[in-house]
Structures are given as structure tokens and as C-alpha cells.
Amino acid sequence: MKKIKINIYEKLRRQNNLTQYEIAKILRVGQQTISRIERGESLPSFNFLKQAHIKLGLDLNVAIRSSRKEFTWVEKE
């Protein structure tokens, strides 16, 4: 099994079994926005965080404390 790095936003998306396109539609943002946030190139807006909390259960305390370069190691099959 190989280990890869993902940030909390990608982890949230994967836990909900969503593609970037699907989560973008749910949160009413562009797919490119999701991609940039997941790669750490952009920080999410307050509205993004609020909608992710309401619609997907994002823990706002974790999201606010996380920096854009903070990643979690996960196992990939």
C-alpha cells in the first residue's frame, strides 16, 4: 500500500465520495477553485468554509487552524 499526502479539503471530498466537479456544484464554486484549494494554491473564502460546514460537515475549528500547506498522510490502495 502506498501513502499519499492530501489536505483536509481533499480528505473531506473523498470521505463524501465526491469528485471535484460534484463538490464544486454543491458549494456553488468552480471546479478550478476546488482544485486550487486542494493543491494549496488558494485559501478558501469564509463563504466556502461556511457552505462546506453546512452541507458537508466540515469542522470549522480544524479548517481555520489548518494552513494551506498542512497535509494529512493517508493510505491509498
Image (cartoon, rainbow, N blue to C red):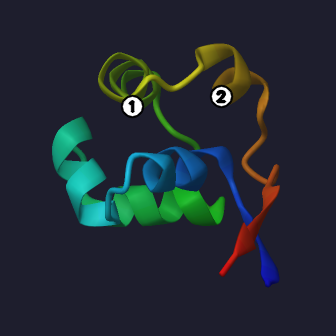
- Rendered-image quadrant of the N terminus: bottom right
Q: Quadrant of residue 17?
A: bottom left
Distance from Cα at disc 1 to Cα at disc 2: 11 Å
Which quadrant of the rendered structure holds the C terminus? bottom right
Answer left or right for 44 relative to 6: left
Residue 62, percent from left and from top: 71, 24
Image spot of residue 50 (x, y percent): 40, 18
Residue 39, compared with residue 66, is above or below; it is below
Q: Amino acid at mark 1?
A: Phe
Tell me whether the residue at label 1 lies in contact with that at label 2, contact meaning CB atoms closer than 8 angstroms.
no
Residue drawn at the location 52% of the way across and 44% of the way down: 12
Give the number of callouts: 2
Q: Quadrant of residue 56?
A: top left
Rendering quarter of residue 22? bottom left
Q: Is residue 74 visible?
A: yes
Classify 46 as above or below 73: above
Q: Which one is nearer the viewer's eye here, 75 or 43?
A: 75
Query: Which residue is depicted at the point 20% across and 40% down?
Result: 26
Label 1 sits on residue = 48
Q: Residues within 10 Å of mark 2 (few under 14, many from 20)?
A: some
Residue marked by disc 2:
63
Q: Secondary structure at mark 1?
A: helix
Q: Position of residue 55 (x, y in %)?
A: 30, 24
Q: Nearer the viewer, mark 1 or mark 2?
A: 2
